[in-house]
Image (spheres, grey):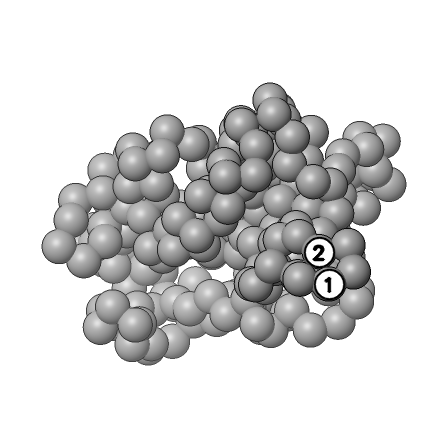
């Protein structure tokens, strides 16, 4: 199996990827659901970091520092940094922000590598719906130094149009910020995995294809 297929099986085994009849926050009825909160063990987090590392290397992403937006992005950036070193011998810095600047001790807004002028940074998060996390951290990073945010790495791209728009959340981020978004997998990869029998749930294929036909953005 490819690392993408292995990741989809991993998500299904962890209960992160499930099939059924779900009402999303958008109000849409979806035949599948992604719940990253079901990664709950050290083993799962370590494996998740390896898949992010595979995506990083596969896409030849250029970065000196991995940045994890508080709070969900913190363990993702750390586990990816560890996996890159252990699996690919790529030693990168990591950094994450505090929700509020610390006013005692060493102080400051960031933990780990402090942002520096010209530094290439890859932001790591789980999924993207509105780009809120990126909108919150970019001003913080840019206020600290003249950094170069090269990429935004997420687990999955649903590839569906936002409410009232024609672009997906990923496309809107790329258009607004000029930052390339990379995902470990997307909805087409999930459909392909179902067709190949990588995971169970082939009975949901018609609903999956109908959903993306109705709500899918043009790529």
**Mark seen at residue 59:** none
The quarter in which the C terminus is drawn is: top left
Q: Residue 98, position in %: x, y?
A: 61, 59
Q: Name the residue under label 2.
A: 107
Task: Tell me, yes or no, whether the two marked residues, 2 and 1, touch with CB atoms within 8 Å.
Answer: yes
Residue 41 horizontal side relative to residue 140, left or right:
right
Which residue is painted at 85% across and 31% down in the image? 89
Q: 150 and 59: which one is in front?
A: 150
Residue extending farthest to the front is 104
Whether residue 162 appears in this view of the structure is yes
What SS does tag 1 mark?
A: loop
- x, y (%) of residue 32? 39, 67
Q: Where residue 111 appears, x then y in whole percent?
A: 71, 52
The residue that label 1 is drawn on is: 104
Q: Which residue shows up at 71% across the image and 56% down it?
A: 107
The image quadrant of residue 62 is top right
Asked where in the image residue 38 lies, by quadrant, the reply is bottom right
Quarter containing the N terminus: top right
- On the image, the x and y values in percent for residue 135 come to 39, 48
Query: Circle 2 sits in a helix, a strand or a loop, which is it?
Result: loop
Q: In the picture provided, is 123 more to the left or to the right than 81? A: left
Q: Is residue 106 above or below residue 23?
A: above
Tag 2: Cα neighbours inside 10 Å, few (<14), some, or many (≥20)? few
Above or below, 176 relative to 103: above
Kindly report the distance in space between the C-alpha atoms of the residues bearing marks 2 and 1: 5 Å
The count of marks equals 2
Identified at 79% across, 64% down, the residue is 43
């Amino acid at each position: 199996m490819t690392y993408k297929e292995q990741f989809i099986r991993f998500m299904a085994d962890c209960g992160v990827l499930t099939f059924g009849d779900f009402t999303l926050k958008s109000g849409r009825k979806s035949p599948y659901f992604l719940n990253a909160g079901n990664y709950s063990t050290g083993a799962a987090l370590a494996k998740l970091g390896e898949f992010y590392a595979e995506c990083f290397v596969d896409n030849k992403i250029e970065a000196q520092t991995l940045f994890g937006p508080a709070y969900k992005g913190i363990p993702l950036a750390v586990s990816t940094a560890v996996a890159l070193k252990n699996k690919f011998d790529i030693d990168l810095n990591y950094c994450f922000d505090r929700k509020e600047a610390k006013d005692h001790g060493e102080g400051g807004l960031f933990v780990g590598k402090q942002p520096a002028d010209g530094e290439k940074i890859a932001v790591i998060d789980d999924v993207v719906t509105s780009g809120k996390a990126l909108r919150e951290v970019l001003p913080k990073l840019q206020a600290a130094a003249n950094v170069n945010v090269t990429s935004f790495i997420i687990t999955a791209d649903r590839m569906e149009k936002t409410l009232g728009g024609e672009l997906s959340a990923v496309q809107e981020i790329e258009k607004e910020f000029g930052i390339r978004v990379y995902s470990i997998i997307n909805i087409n990869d999930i459909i392909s995995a179902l067709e190949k029998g990588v995971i169970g749930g082939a009975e949901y294929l018609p609903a999956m294809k109908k959903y993306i036909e109705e709500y899918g953005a043009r790529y």
